[in-house]
Amino acid sequence: MSQTFRIPEILAMARRDGQVSVDKLAAHFGVTLQTIRRDLSDLADAGRLERVHGGAILPSGITNIAYEERRALNQSAKARIAAATSRMIPSDCAVFLNIGTTTEAVARALVHHQNLLVVTNNINVAQILGANPDCQVIVVGGTMRPADGGVVGELAARFVSAFKFDYAVIGCSALDHDGDILDYDMQEVVVSQSALNQARATVLVCDQSKLTRAAPARIGSVSELDQIVTDCALPDVVSRICHAAATHITVA
């Protein structure tokens, strides 16, 4: 198989899993390790992947991955995270869900809960939970971001501050190895911060792809959370911070 045919499939695998390895790609395509290394180097030179030891990851920096690519990334892991999170949330409570494809997965896992009040700045979450007749959905007011249906900005943050939630469930774009929860858009961050401040229990939903990415805007620290639901073991430093702060980690 020529590089012309390998490249699109390598990118599709990276978007699906968040990362690719030289060994697995070589076995998959039946080519040498050196051939795959050249493919990955070419993709890195073009800015489409970022080289790491043993493979490559989706590029990170100051801008987020396109929404449809994020939606396709680690779908099975997000479904497991969502199922575990939904089991933590009882019926008859008030919940906030922020922007993100993992929180959208949580919304799908909540479609059979009863008597929920859900406040969200995610238009996609509102549409998903609109299928639940036992769920009252309140969409935050503010500036809508057309790329992903997110409602952001100071007006949205003030809107959220009028509520008291039993649970605030947030996603993020990156989880730094010092325990900082990161995102790309400060206009989005202020809404998540407001929700965390207004919640009795706080939950971060975070798949393993967030551990290999970087983002510039800080939401807060894992030490400020009650729960983290993820699909892999967290780095040792992050785990120690969570243990010291009594932040519970659930690996789905």
Image (cartoon, grey):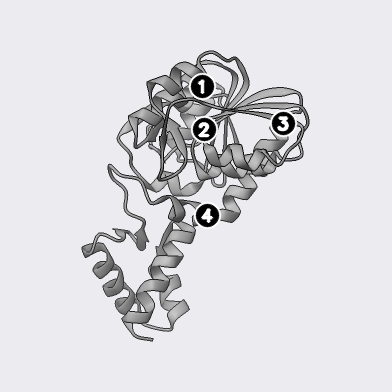
In the picture, the disc for residue 16 is none
Mark earlier in primary sequence (1, 4): 4
Mark earlier in primary sequence (2, 1): 2
Q: Nearer the viewer, mark 1 or mark 3?
A: 3
Mark earlier in primary sequence (1, 3): 3
Whether the residues at callouts 3 and 2 have beta carbons within 8 Å, the answer is no
Three-letter amino acid code at disc 3? Answer: Cys
**Does dot 1 land on a helix, a strand or a loop?**
helix
Q: Is residue 197 above or below residue 132?
A: above
Q: Residues under labels 2 and 1: Cα distance?
A: 8 Å
In the picture, the disc for residue 98 is 2
Q: Is residue 57 above or below residue 112?
A: below
In the rendered structure, the answer to whether residue 191 lies left or right of residue 215 reads right
In the picture, the disc for residue 195 is 1
Three-letter amino acid code at disc 4? Answer: Asn
Q: Nearer the viewer, mark 3 or mark 2?
A: 3
Disc 4 packing (10 Å; few <14; some 14–19; many ≥20): many
In the rendered structure, the answer to whether residue 154 lies left or right of residue 43 reads right
Q: Residue 93, position in %: x, y?
A: 71, 22
Residue plotted at (40% across, 23% down): 190
In the picture, the disc for residue 135 is 3
Q: Residue 122, position in %: x, y?
A: 52, 36
Residue bearing mark 4 = 74
Disc 1 packing (10 Å; few <14; some 14–19; many ≥20): many
Residue plotted at (56% across, 22% down): 246
Mark earlier in primary sequence (4, 2): 4
Three-letter amino acid code at disc 2? Answer: Asn
